[in-house]
Image (spheres, rainbow, N blue to C red):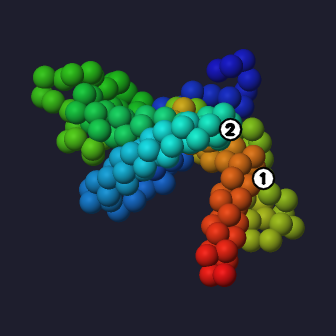
Amino acid sequence: MFGLPWARIHFVENEGMAFGLTFGGVTGKYILSLVRIILVGVLAYVIKGLIEAKEAKGLLVSLSLITAGAIGNIIDSAFYGIIFNASKYHGEAATMFPAEGGYSSFLQGKVVDMLYFPMINSNFPDWFPFWGGDRFTFFNPVFNVADASISIGITMLLIFYNRFFTQKKEEEIAKGFSEEE
């Protein structure tokens, strides 16, 4: 894929969160979905306020990326299990709208991850502590566009807009001191 040996399309059905992390079975999936839905609502409210306050466009973009990624994962987990039957990884592909119905209920579907970038595939040197001689793959997680969107949005916030959060906190502290006087 992409004409590069280290960039591949690799089909994986993810049971839980970004990069294949899982969270407590059926109950965990419902909790995760509820948290995602609440997060999207809160972020939409915050973004609306920031637009009205005419904050930096980059801040709005970073929060919008996080929101869009969360929505994408909500949609996958909400409907993928209803729309498709269970796929077989090396055999028959999943069927869309099968007569017998999907493989799970609302908010219990898997999220499809497909982007895989194993850039370095080698062994640790024998002298390396704990993992000496073991196989090592740098960037091993399989992810999707929603995961990438969330990761990019959070990275943008941390690198470029950390001052936004610390500046607001400093203003609140200064306001508290002026009210005490």
Task: Using the rendered image of the protein, determine whether residue 104 is visible from the camera's viewpoint.
Answer: no
Q: Which residue is mark 2?
A: 56
Q: Height in image: 166 above or below 146?
A: below
How dense is the environment of label 1, judged by Cα within 10 Å: few (below 14), some, or many (20 and up)? Answer: few
Name the image quarter holding the C terminus: bottom right
Furthest residue in direction front, as rendered: 181
Instruction: Please state which amino acid type lies under the numbered disc 1.
Output: Asn
**Residue at 44% across / 44% down in the picture?**
45
The answer to which image quadrant residue 101 occupies is top left
Q: Residue 152: x percent and y percent?
A: 65, 40
Instruction: Please state which amino acid type lies under the numbered disc 2.
Output: Ala
Q: On the picture, is 108 further left or further right than 41?
A: left
> Of 7 and 108, which appears nearest the observer?
108
Q: On the picture, is 144 further left or further right than 26?
A: right
Q: Height in image: 8 above or below 180?
A: above
Q: Which residue is mark 1?
A: 123
Mark 1 or 2, closer to the camera: 2
Q: On the picture, is 123 further left or further right than 69?
A: right
Q: Residue 26: x percent and y percent?
A: 27, 56
Q: On the picture, is 117 further left or further right than 100?
A: right
**Residue at 68% across / 19% down in the picture?**
2
> Of 31 and 59, which appears nearest the observer?
59
The answer to which image quadrant residue 78 occupies is top left
> Is there a contact, CB below 8 Å, between mark 1 and mark 2?
no
